[in-house]
């Protein structure tokens, strides 16, 4: 665990406890893919002359110009993941807007206190479409439940590069993967660790072209997410670690 991840986990652990915040494992995964995403955007923006300094605060309905990157977090809570991501964006000095979806008034108040960054707050998924993000690669983090329809709509309107589903949200994992079946994707599972009882699932989008391997990845996800399937494979002696290697 990096010092940043460790410090953030300790900070929010003291506020709400381990059951209410992202696990250390999930934070490590999110930090790793945020770094990858920022490096990719940095390379593309420099090549296309879109490199610019720290993000500015955008008003609702403002158009986000350019073809760089954007981070969208569904379920920001009091700011555990938001704090981590915003620190990485600030350190990069790239113009990567951070859009946070949160509906709980208490969490919104704490989020604004805890995160010193000009993030964009939205209270409904539909608000995100007014920012015209079709040309920007997206790092999408799902840390709260939204309906299957909203999830599908979100993925149709955005240009996802990485989708990180925190925790054991099996239904949302399946909905996300199903929404991306017309693209080439890779699905990775990051399970329990010595300090976490829940991890994350990361879906990487490699291209907008269909690929038959996407369907294999999808059905692997179905098996991994199915309690009945896991019990069956365990019953015939296949452990969870080996189950991940199927297909």
Image: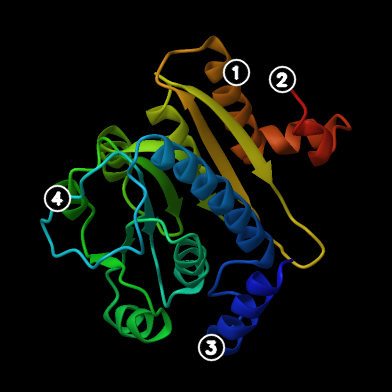
Q: Estimate how packed mark 3 is, as few (under 14), some (14 to 19) or many (20 or more) residues with alpha carbons within 10 Å.
A: few
The residues tagged by marks 4 and 3 sit, at their Cα atoms, a distance apart of 35 Å
Sequence-first tag of 1 and 2: 1
Per the rendering, the mark at residue 247 is: 2
Residue 28 in the image: state x and y as whole percent. 66, 60
Q: Nearer the viewer, residue 173 or 232?
A: 173
**Residue located farthest toward the left when viewing the structure as drawn:** 61
- Contact? badges 1 and 4 (CB < 8 Å): no
At horizontal 13% and vertical 62% (from top left) the residue drawn is: 60
Which residue position is annotated with label 3?
Answer: 15
**The furthest residue to the right:** 237
| Residue 86 in view | yes
- Kindly report the distance in space between the C-alpha atoms of the residues bearing marks 1 and 4: 38 Å
Image quadrant in which you'd find residue 240? top right
- The percent coordinates of residue 239 (x first, y second) are 84, 38
User: Disc 3 to disc 2, how far (Cα)?
Assistant: 42 Å
Query: Is 161 situated above or below 212?
Result: below
Q: Residue at x 50, y 12 (%)?
A: 211
Q: CA distance from mark 1 to mark 2?
A: 7 Å
Residue visible at 49% across and 63% down in the picture: 85
* Sooner in the amino-acid sequence: mark 4 or mark 3: 3
Task: Mark 1 or mark 3: name the one nearer the start of the chain.
Answer: 3
């Amino acid at each position: 665990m990096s010092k940043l991840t460790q410090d953030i986990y300790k900070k929010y652990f003291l506020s709400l406890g381990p059951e209410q915040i992202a696990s250390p494992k999930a934070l490590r995964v999110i930090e790793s893919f945020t770094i990858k995403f920022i490096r990719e955007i940095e390379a593309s923006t420099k090549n296309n002359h879109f490199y610019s300094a720290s993000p500015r605060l955008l008003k609702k309905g403002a158009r986000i110009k350019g073809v760089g990157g954007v981070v969208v977090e569904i379920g920001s809570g009091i700011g555990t993941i938001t704090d981590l991501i915003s620190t990485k964006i600030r350190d990069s000095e790239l113009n990567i807007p951070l859009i946070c979806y949160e509906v709980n008034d208490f969490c919104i108040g704490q989020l604004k206190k805890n995160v010193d960054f000009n993030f964009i707050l939205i209270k409904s998924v539909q608000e995100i479409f007014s920012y015209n993000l079709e040309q920007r690669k997206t790092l999408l983090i799902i840390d709260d439940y939204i309906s299957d329809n909203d999830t599908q709509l979100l993925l149709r309107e955005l240009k996802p590069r990485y989708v990180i589903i925190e925790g054991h949200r099996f239904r949302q994992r399946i909905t996300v993967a199903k929404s991306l079946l017309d693209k080439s994707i890779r699905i990775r599972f990051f399970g329990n660790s010595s300090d976490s009882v829940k991890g994350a699932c990361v879906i990487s989008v490699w291209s907008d072209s269909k690929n038959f391997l996407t369907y294999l990845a999808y059905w692997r996800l179905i098996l991994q997410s199915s309690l009945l399937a896991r019990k069956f494979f365990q019953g015939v002696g296949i452990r969870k670690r080996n189950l991940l290697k199927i297909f």
